[in-house]
Image (cartoon, helix red, strand yellow):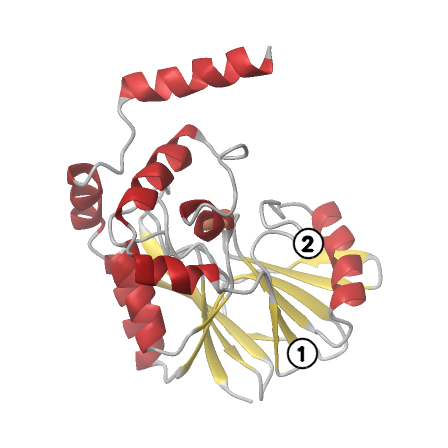
């Protein structure tokens, strides 16, 4: 049992990852759990991989990790994601790609903590509604019968859902939360990368104590201007004309 730092959706954003790790270090979290999407969108995929590896983080694969290493296609990607992932494929080192290629699709920690990226069986599912959580709670009970907390990512928003039977309740996340051992929880620690957030750009993560069964959501400021300048200079931002071209190619292929 331990105090875990839970993070995900880093997307090659080194400044945000460093900010989150500093915040977790300050709170004494030595163990790291990562729900995937280490790469994509931003200019430091190799540095983010190296930092997670140096910290011994337990990591699973997100859809961007699969697409960026050629194990999944671009079919369900937005134009922005497709463009930056094409760039990532060209720049990612063989060493990082090999490590990303070995990441499991999901994993169980301490028998009670499950890590998935999108849905329990669909890495590209956005779990954003109570029916999504209800359906995935059924899948979790089938695939990980001992799990009581399921951390997920992909939708890039800090969320906490409590599941009791078929009843799903979204709970507030603004304080340290004592979880009940009677219920099942679905938890999104948020997105380390905040470059595409419209509101304040803060790197998000969570602190989970598996001894006390408590949860706290954290947000850390980082230098998002530097991240954006680096991503633009390194060719990770889609030009307007290419964006238009991708849209029309998709429409023609769908016709
Ligand atoms: Fe993501
Ligand atoms: Fe994702």
Residue 220 seen from this side:
no
Q: Is residue 62 above or below residue 165?
A: above
**Label ID, residue 112:** 1
Whether pointer 1 and pointer 2 mark residues with C-beta atoms closer than 8 Å, the reply is no
Q: Is residue 193 left or right of residue 247?
A: left
Horizontal and vertical percent for residue 243? 35, 21
The Cα–Cα distance between marks 1 and 2, rounded to whole angstroms, is 18 Å
Q: Element at badge 1?
A: loop
Q: Quadrant of residue 234?
A: top left
- Which residue shows up at 77% across the image and 51% down it? 135
| Image quarter in which the N terminus is found | bottom right
**Label ID, residue 121:** 2
Camera-side residue: 171 or 122?
Answer: 122
Horizontal and vertical percent for residue 138? 80, 59
Q: Is residue 176 above or below residue 211?
A: above
Q: Element at badge 2?
A: loop
Q: Mark 2, residues whose alpha carbon is within 10 Å: few (<14), some, or many (≥20)?
A: some
């Amino acid at each position: 049992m331990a105090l875990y730092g839970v993070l995900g959706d880093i997307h090659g954003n080194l400044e945000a990852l460093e900010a989150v790790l500093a915040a977790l270090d300050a709170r004494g979290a030595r163990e790291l759990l990562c729900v995937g999407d280490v790469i994509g969108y931003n200019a430091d995929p190799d540095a983010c991989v190296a930092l997670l590896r140096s910290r011994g983080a337990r990591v699973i694969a997100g859809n961007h990790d699969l697409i960026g290493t050629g194990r999944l296609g671009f079919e369900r990607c937005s134009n922005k994601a497709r463009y930056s992932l094409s760039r990532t494929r060209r720049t990612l080192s063989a060493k990082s790609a090999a490590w990303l290629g070995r990441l499991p699709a999901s994993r169980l920690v301490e028998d009670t903590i499950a890590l998935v990226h999108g849905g329990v069986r669909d890495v590209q599912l956005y779990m954003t509604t109570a029916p999504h959580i209800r359906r995935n709670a059924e899948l979790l009970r089938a695939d990980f019968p001992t799990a009581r907390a399921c951390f997920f990512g992909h939708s890039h928003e800090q969320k906490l859902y409590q599941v009791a039977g078929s009843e799903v309740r979204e709970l507030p996340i603004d304080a340290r939360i004592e979880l009940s051992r009677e219920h099942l929880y679905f938890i999104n620690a948020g997105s380390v990368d905040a470059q595409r957030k419209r509101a304040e750009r803060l790197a998000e993560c969570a602190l989970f104590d598996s001894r006390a069964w408590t949860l706290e959501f954290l947000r850390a400021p980082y230098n998002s201007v530097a991240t954006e300048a680096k991503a633009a200079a390194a060719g990770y931002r889609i030009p307007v004309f290419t964006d238009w071209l991708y849209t029309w190619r998709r429409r023609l292929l769908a016709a």
